[in-house]
Image (cartoon, rainbow, N blue to C red):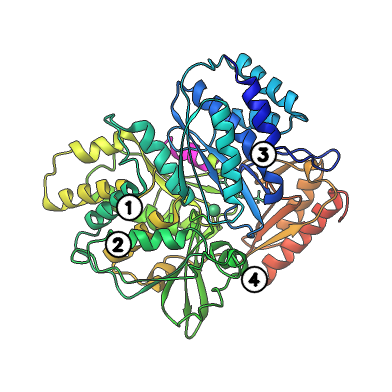
C-alpha cells in the first residue's frame, strides 16, 4: 500500500527549506537549480517524483542527475531523465513543482498520494531509478536525500556516482533497452566508453587527425571521464593526441572558474590558463560535459570561436554529403533545428549552400530535440554548444539494409552507421560531439581555419536586461517576436528597420530573473547600437530597472 509513514519519517530527515514569501521552487529548463544549501529537501522530493514516474511507466528506469552544469561550485541542481534518455516529459514538470512546494511533510504525503490517484499510478508495482552526480561537494548530501526517498517508496535504485550528464542519459536508455533489438549499449560506464571508442575507430576509417587537440574540461566531471575514455581508443588504429587541461576536480572552488564552454562563449575568449598556444586546436566542455566550444588563438588575427551554430553546420554538411554519396538523398529527410540565437549567417549557409531545411524553436534543449525527432536525420544545436544529431530507426535500418552498388556507396553507408553510434542519441554530449567534429575534420582534411572559412558570422550582441517583472514579456514565433506587452514589438520593429541586415528579439530568461536581448546587423557598431536601443525599450516596458 501507500508509503505514507516511510515518506513522513524520511522527509523529516531531509526537510524542505522555505523560500522568501511569495517565492516558489520551479522545475525549469534545467530542472531545479540554485544554491546547494536549498536543495536537500528538493532532491528528496524529486526522488518521490522519479519513483512515481517509473511506476507510471510500468517500472521502466527513470534517471536523476545531480548537477548545476556551468554554474559556480556553490550551486547545484537536480533533474529527471525519461526512459529513452530524454528530458522529463513537460506535463510532469508541474507535478515536480507541486511536490517540491508542498509546505509541510503532511502536505507532501497528501500531494504524493493525490498524484498517484489522479494519474492512476499503482504504488504496488516495482519502480526503478538510477542516478549520478557531477563533482560538486554538495552532490553527496543530495544523493543521500534522493536515496532516502527511493527507499521510502520501495524503489530499486542504482547509484552510478560521478558521471557526466550525457553518461547518465546513456545509462537510462541502455537500462531500458537492454535485451531488446533496440539495445543502446552495455549498461555500464565502461559500456559507454566502449561504444564510443568502437564507433570512433569505425567512423575514422583510417583517416589521420592532424596535430594536438587541447581540451579544457572546466575543472568538472568531464576531465576524469575524458581521461578514462581515451584509454579505450586503440592506439594502433587511431592516433588521437589529446591534451586534457583544467581537469582539477579536487579543488571545488575552481569548477567553471575562468574556463569551460560557458566562459568561452560568453567572454568570447580562450581560458587564460593554461596560456593558449597560438594556432593549437582547442575546445572547452562545460561543468557537466554537455556543451562544447571549439576555438583557436591565431597569431595574426587573435581568438576565433566555433560555437554550436558552427558545429551544427559542420555536421549537417558532412552528413548531407554522406547521404548523397550513399544514394539516399531521396529516401531520407534531413533537417536542421536552431533557436532564434543562431547567427543569421549560419541559417543562410545551411538553407542556401547546403540546401537543407532549417526550423527555429524556442530556447531549451527539449524543444529542439522534439523537432529534430521529426526527421530521419535531425541536426540540432543551440549556439551555446549544446546539441546532437538524431537518427530515426528508419535511417538506421536503411544504413544497414541498403546493398551498396559501388565501393564509394559502401563507404558512405558504413560511415553513416558509425556516426549514428558515435553521436549520443539521447542528449547533447560534449565528448561525443567532440569526437564527431574530429572525425569530420579528419575526413575533410580541414583545420579549424578551413572550418571557419565556410561562412562569416554577422556581428551580433547579446544583452542582459534587468526588469521589474520579466513575466510581462510573452513571445510568439519561436521567441522571435513579443506578443506582450502591447506596443513593444512595434517599437523593436521600428528600430530594426533602421539597420542593414538587422534582426533583433527580446525574451524573458528561463533561468534567471531578467530579459535577454539579441541583435545582429551588418557591422559590429550597428549590432551594438541596435542591441542597446532594444534593451532600452525592454527596460521601459518591463517596469524599469531593479
Ligand atoms: C537552460 C537550457 C539551455 C538554454 C538555457 C537558456 C536545457 C537542458 N538547458 O540552461 O538549453 O540555452 O537554459 O537560458 O534545456 P535562458 O533562458 O536564461 O536564456
Ligand atoms: Mg551543461
Q: Residues within 10 Å of mark 2 (few under 14, many from 20)?
A: few
Q: Position of residue 188 (x, y in %)?
A: 35, 44
Q: Earlier in the sequence, mark 1 or mark 2?
A: 1
Residue reaching furthest to the bottom:
300
Mark 4–mark 2 Cα distance, whole angstroms, equals 45 Å
Q: Quadrant of residue 341?
A: bottom right
Residue behind mark 1: 193
Residue stretch in magenta: 367-375
Q: Quadrant of residue 365?
A: top right
Mark 4–mark 3 Cα distance, whole angstroms, equals 44 Å
Q: Earlier in the sequence, mark 2 or mark 3?
A: 3
Mark 1–mark 2 Cα distance, whole angstroms, equals 9 Å
Residue behind mark 4: 524
Task: Say if residue 358 shows up in the picture.
Answer: yes
Q: Residue at x 29, y 65 (%)?
A: 442
Q: Position of residue 535 (x, y in %)?
A: 77, 58
Q: Secondary structure at mark 1?
A: helix
- State if disc 2 and disc 1 touch (CB < 8 Å): yes
- State if disc 1 and disc 4 touch (CB < 8 Å): no
Q: Residue at x 61, y 35 (%)?
A: 46
Q: Position of residue 6 (x, y in %)?
A: 62, 25
Mark 1–mark 3 Cα distance, whole angstroms, equals 32 Å
- Quadrant of image for the C terminus: bottom right
- Quadrant of image for the N terminus: top right
Q: Position of residue 179 (x, y in %)?
A: 28, 30
Amino acid at each position: 500500500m501507500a508509503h505514507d509513514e516511510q515518506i513522513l519519517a524520511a522527509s523529516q530527515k531531509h526537510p524542505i527549506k522555505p523560500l522568501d514569501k511569495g517565492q516558489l521552487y520551479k522545475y525549469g529548463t534545467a530542472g531545479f537549480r540554485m544554491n546547494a544549501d536549498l536543495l536537500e529537501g528538493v532532491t528528496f522530493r524529486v526522488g518521490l517524483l522519479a519513483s512515481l514516474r517509473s511506476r507510471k511507466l510500468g517500472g521502466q528506469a527513470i534517471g536523476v542527475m545531480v548537477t548545476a552544469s556551468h554554474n559556480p561550485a556553490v550551486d547545484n541542481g537536480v533533474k529527471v531523465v525519461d526512459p529513452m534518455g530524454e528530458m522529463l516529459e513537460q506535463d510532469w514538470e508541474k507535478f515536480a513543482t507541486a511536490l517540491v512546494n508542498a509546505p509541510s511533510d503532511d502536505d507532501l504525503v497528501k500531494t504524493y498520494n493525490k498524484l498517484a490517484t489522479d494519474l492512476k499510478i499503482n504504488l504496488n508495482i516495482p519502480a526503478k531509478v538510477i542516478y549520478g552526480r557531477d563533482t560538486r561537494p554538495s552532490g553527496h548530501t543530495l544523493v543521500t536525500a534522493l536515496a532516502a526517498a527511493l527507499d521510502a517508496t520501495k524503489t530499486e535504485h542504482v547509484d552510478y556516482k560521478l558521471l557526466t550528464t550525457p553518461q547518465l542519459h546513456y545509462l537510462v536508455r541502455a537500462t531500458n533497452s537492454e535485451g531488446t533489438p533496440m539495445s543502446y549499449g552495455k549498461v555500464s560506464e565502461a559500456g559507454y566508453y566502449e561504444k564510443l571508442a568502437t564507433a570512433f575507430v569505425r567512423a575514422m576509417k583510417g583517416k589521420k587527425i592532424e596535430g594536438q587537440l587541447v581540451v579544457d574540461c572546466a575543472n568538472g566531471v568531464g576531465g576524469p571521464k575524458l581521461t578514462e575514455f581515451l584509454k579505450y581508443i586503440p592506439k594502433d588504429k587511431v592516433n588521437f593526441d589529446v591534451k586534457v587541461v583544467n581537469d582539477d576536480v579536487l579543488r571545488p572552488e575552481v569548477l567553471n572558474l575562468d574556463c569551460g564552454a560557458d566562459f568561452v562563449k560568453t567572454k568570447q575568449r580562450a581560458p587564460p590558463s593554461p596560456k593558449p598556444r597560438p594556432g593549437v586546436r582547442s575546445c572547452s566542455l562545460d561543468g557537466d560535459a554537455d556543451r562544447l566550444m571549439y576555438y583557436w588563438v591565431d597569431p595574426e588575427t587573435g581568438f576565433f570561436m566555433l560555437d554550436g551554430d558552427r558545429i551544427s553546420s559542420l555536421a549537417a554538411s558532412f552528413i548531407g554529403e554522406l547521404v548523397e554519396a550513399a544514394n539516399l538523398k531521396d529516401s531520407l529527410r534531413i533537417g536542421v533545428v536552431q533557436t532564434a540565437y543562431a547567427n543569421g549567417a549560419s541559417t543562410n549557409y545551411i538553407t542556401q549552400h547546403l540546401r537543407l531545411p532549417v526550423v527555429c524553436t524556442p530556447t531549451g534543449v527539449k524543444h529542439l530535440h522534439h523537432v529534430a525527432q521529426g526527421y530521419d536525420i535531425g541536426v540540432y544545436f543551440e549556439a551555446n554548444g549544446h546539441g546532437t544529431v538524431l537518427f530515426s530507426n528508419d535511417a538506421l535500418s536503411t544504413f544497414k539494409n541498403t546493398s551498396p552498388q559501388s565501393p564509394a556507396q559502401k563507404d558512405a553507408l558504413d560511415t553513416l552507421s558509425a556516426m549514428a553510434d558515435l553521436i549520443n542519441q539521447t542528449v547533447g554530449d560534449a565528448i561525443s560531439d567532440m569526437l564527431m567534429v574530429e572525425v569530420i575534420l579528419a575526413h575533410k582534411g580541414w583545420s579549424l581555419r578551413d572550418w571557419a572559412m565556410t561562412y562569416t558570422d554577422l556581428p551580433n550582441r547579446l544583452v542582459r536586461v534587468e526588469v521589474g517583472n520579466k513575466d510581462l514579456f510573452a513571445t510568439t514565433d519561436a521567441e522571435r517576436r513579443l506578443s506582450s506587452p502591447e506596443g513593444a514589438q512595434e517599437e523593436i520593429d521600428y528600430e530594426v528597420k533602421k539597420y542593414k541586415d538587422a534582426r533583433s528579439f527580446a525574451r524573458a530568461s528561463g533561468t534567471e530573473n531578467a530579459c535577454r536581448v539579441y541583435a545582429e546587423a551588418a557591422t559590429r557598431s550597428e549590432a551594438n547600437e541596435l542591441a542597446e536601443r532594444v534593451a532600452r525599450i525592454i527596460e521601459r516596458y518591463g517596469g524599469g530597472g531593479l
